Image (spheres, rainbow, N blue to C red):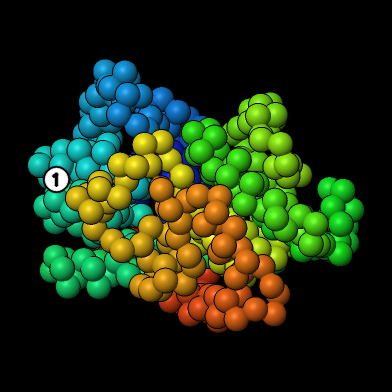
């Protein structure tokens, strides 16, 4: 079989690469052409990487506008390459602005089936995209269990839940990681006797600017009570960027120890976490670490109004979305103040407290809903089933 796969960012590159590996296990003759990154190139051959996601991955209105000619050229080129190669299927991985346009082209020209792995989050915003999905996508392979009922009940569109790849990634790490708490703490100059609070302040620079200082300030009242803080530094952000923010901390703000490229190791030994929204909330829960979701952004005063108009969900964190109820506290936009985070920490930090106990019990429900590892294998099996029909 010939598979044309499109992933437009780093996370998509990872998930698509794992899917490609699973496809090859069931289809040894599989051929790939793809838009993606280095991980996909390792699985499908660097000569088949038609365009790196770095040439297309722009977020925010201004970056997209500035690079619009480049993005449009990429779309035209992609369509031509699909038409010329005539694959047996096109697999789209997230990245809806680009991928839905490709799906429209492939469907219009009846080239091959189109399958979507990691669906556009139309349950959160841009619900109108269901028209494009229903018309142009033959099957959605979902990684979020609540999407099944959402698509079926709200839109009469059947999809397949194949498991969540983050479950696979955390499970694989746990199986291979064998560093003791004593060794981890000693290696990083931490005190094994103190309660470790992990700070996951985001992967983008603006997120870090908006959240890190407030996270650290919220911890200030607890630092002489047997607590310590460590920052999970994002792989793509230079250390000097963090140091520049820390140098501007107000007096009395505790400085976190910086842990670079070891988020999973840090979560393995942390007892509590302050986490910005995104996949990190799910990862933190899968490690069994009680957390507070806190996300400040530019123009936060506008968010409550925009949320009522644009956002279709009650929650923003994946933990709450999957469980369909409040499992972790969300302090978003104007609610993300130093005072509010401190108040929530008072409830969460006591290790024998009811808040921690209840959250850990709810994490068990989260694990049950997400299911066992094996998302790429399940997705590959579903693709084989669909292509054999």
Asked if residue 252 lies left or right of residue 362, the reply is right
Q: Percent from the top left, x then y, of residue 189?
A: 87, 48
Instruction: Determine whether 130 is above or below 255 in the image.
Output: below
| Nearer-the-camera pick, 214 or 386 | 214
Secondary structure under tag 1 reads: helix
* Residue 115 against residue 357 in the figure, above or below: above
Above or below residue 255? Residue 287 is below
Give the total number of marks visible in the rendering: 1
Residue 298 is situated, as x and y percent measured from the top left of the image, at: 41, 36
Looking at the picture, how far across and down is residue 47, in whole percent?
47, 30
Report the residue marked by disc 1.
Answer: 107
Q: Is residue 74 left or right of residue 237?
A: left
Taking the image as shown, residue 324 lies to the left or right of residue 84, namely right
Coordinates of residue 190 in the picture (x, y in percent): 84, 52
Decide which of 58, 274 is in the foreground and name it.
Answer: 274
Residue 247, picture quadrant: top right
């Amino acid at each position: 079989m010939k598979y044309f796969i499109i992933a437009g960012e780093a996370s998509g590159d990872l998930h698509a690469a794992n899917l490609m590996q699973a496809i090859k296990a069931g289809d040894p003759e599989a051929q790939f052409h793809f838009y993606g990154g280095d991980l996909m190139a390792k699985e499908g051959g660097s000569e088949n990487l038609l365009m790196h996601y770095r040439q297309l991955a722009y977020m925010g209105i201004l970056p997209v506008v500035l690079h619009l000619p480049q993005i449009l050229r990429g779309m035209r080129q992609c369509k031509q390459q699909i038409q010329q190669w005539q694959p047996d299927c096109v697999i789209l991985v997230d990245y809806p602005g680009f991928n839905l346009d490709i799906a429209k082209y492939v469907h219009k020209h009846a080239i091959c089936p189109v399958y979507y792995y990691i669906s556009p989050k139309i349950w959160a915003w841009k619900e109108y995209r269901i028209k494009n999905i229903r018309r142009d996508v033959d099957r959605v392979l979902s990684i979020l269990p609540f999407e099944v009922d959402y698509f079926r009940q709200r839109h009469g569109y059947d999809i397949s839940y194949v498991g969540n790849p983050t479950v696979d990634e955390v499970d694989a790490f746990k199986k291979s990681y064998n560093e003791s708490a004593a060794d981890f703490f000693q290696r990083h100059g931490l005190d094994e006797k103190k309660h470790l609070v992990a700070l996951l302040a985001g992967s983008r620079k603006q997120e870090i600017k908006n959240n890190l200082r407030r996270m650290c300030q919220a911890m200030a009242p607890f630092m002489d009570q047997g607590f310590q803080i460590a920052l999970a530094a994002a792989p793509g952000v230079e250390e000097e960027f963090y140091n520049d923010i820390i140098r501007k901390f107000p007096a009395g703000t505790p400085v976190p120890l910086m842990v670079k490229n070891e988020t999973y190791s840090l979560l393995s030994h942390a007892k509590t976490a302050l986490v910005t929204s995104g996949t990190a909330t799910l990862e933190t829960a899968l490690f069994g670490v009680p957390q507070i979701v806190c996300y400040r952004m530019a123009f936060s005063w506008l968010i409550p109004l925009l949320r009522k108009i644009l956002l279709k969900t009650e929650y923003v964190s994946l933990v709450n979305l999957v469980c369909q109820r409040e499992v972790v506290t969300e302090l978003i936009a104007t609610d993300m103040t130093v005072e509010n985070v401190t108040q929530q920490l008072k409830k969460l930090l006591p290790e024998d407290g009811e808040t921690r106990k209840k959250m850990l019990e709810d994490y068990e429900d989260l694990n049950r809903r997400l299911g066992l590892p094996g998302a790429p294998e399940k997705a590959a099996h579903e693709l084989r089933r669909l292509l054999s029909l």
